[in-house]
């Protein structure tokens, strides 16, 4: 019999582990980018800055929407399928993966950082499987049905 998830796991899920892995890979990418002269994405620094500001604002809005959609006290206790969770199962993680990381990669003006942003996707897909197993254990068929309706990090179009 599987032991129930801790309160910490209910509130934060795999977020801290994912953040650690993402920052570790970011540091390695930073070291590589300083060691090797990489091709720049653009010489238009103001454009890259505007893109970063826009993606940061969009990410902040998505983060606030995610937190408002699922208050901390209710995490892991109730299955929420409304608000941001109506469209994706992990909107907080998605806001970083789809919006912020790519804006940051462009701002840093390096194809190595674009590779870093792309590399995070399969890593987070693997990490989030643990969290989703906990959700299936906790909410059973209800969560399985929810998985059919909402995408993991990107809304299901069809």
Image (spheres, rainbow, N blue to C red):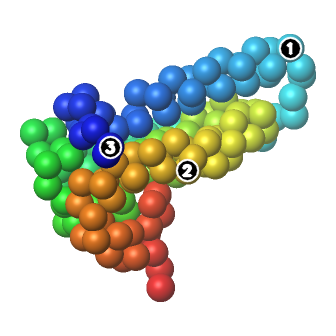
User: Which residue was labeled with disc 3?
Assistant: 2
Q: Residue at x 51, y 23 (%)?
A: 20
Instruction: Of the two numbered discs 2 and 1 on the same chain, state the one appearing first in sequence.
Output: 1
Q: Furthest residue to the front? A: 1
Q: Position of residue 135 (x, y in %)?
A: 31, 54
Instruction: Say whether residue 13 is visible.
Output: yes
Count how many numbered circles sit on residues in the image: 3
Few, some or many C-alpha atoms within 10 Å of disc 3 (few <14, some 14-19, many ≥20)?
few
Q: Residue at x 57, y 30 (%)?
A: 22
Do labels 2 and 3 touch, CB within 8 Å?
A: no
User: Which residue was labeled with disc 2?
Assistant: 125
Q: Which mark is residue 35?
A: 1
Rendering quarter of residue 63: top left
Nearest the viewer among 51 and 130 is: 130
Q: Position of residue 130 (x, y in %)?
A: 45, 45
Q: Is residue 105 above or below residue 20?
A: below
Instruction: Of the two numbered discs 2 and 3 on the same chain, state the one appearing first in sequence.
Output: 3
Instruction: Of the two numbered discs 3 and 1 on the same chain, state the one appearing first in sequence.
Output: 3
Q: Secondary structure at mark 1?
A: helix
Q: Which mark is residue 24?
A: none
Residue 2 falls left or right of residue 129: left
Few, some or many C-alpha atoms within 10 Å of disc 1 (few <14, some 14-19, many ≥20)?
few
Nearest the viewer among 110 and 81 is: 81
Few, some or many C-alpha atoms within 10 Å of disc 2 (few <14, some 14-19, many ≥20)?
few
Residue 47 falls left or right of residue 68: right
Residue 84 falls left or right of residue 53: left
């Amino acid at each position: 019999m599987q032991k129930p998830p801790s309160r910490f796991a209910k509130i934060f899920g795999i977020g801290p582990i994912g953040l650690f892995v993402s920052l570790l890979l970011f540091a390695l990418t930073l070291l590589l980018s300083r060691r090797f002269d990489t091709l720049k994405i653009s010489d238009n620094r103001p454009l890259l800055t505007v893109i970063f500001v826009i993606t940061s604002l969009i990410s902040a809005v998505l983060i606030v929407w995610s937190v408002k959609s699922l208050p901390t006290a209710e995490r892991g206790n109730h299955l929420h399928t409304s608000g941001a969770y109506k469209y994706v199962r992990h909107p907080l993680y998605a806001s970083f993966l789809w919006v912020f990381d790519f804006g940051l990669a462009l701002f840093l003006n390096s194809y190595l950082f674009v590779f870093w942003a792309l590399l995070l996707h399969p890593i987070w897909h693997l990490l989030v499987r643990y969290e989703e197993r906990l959700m299936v254990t906790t909410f059973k068929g209800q969560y399985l049905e929810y998985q059919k309706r909402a995408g993991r990090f990107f809304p299901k179009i069809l």
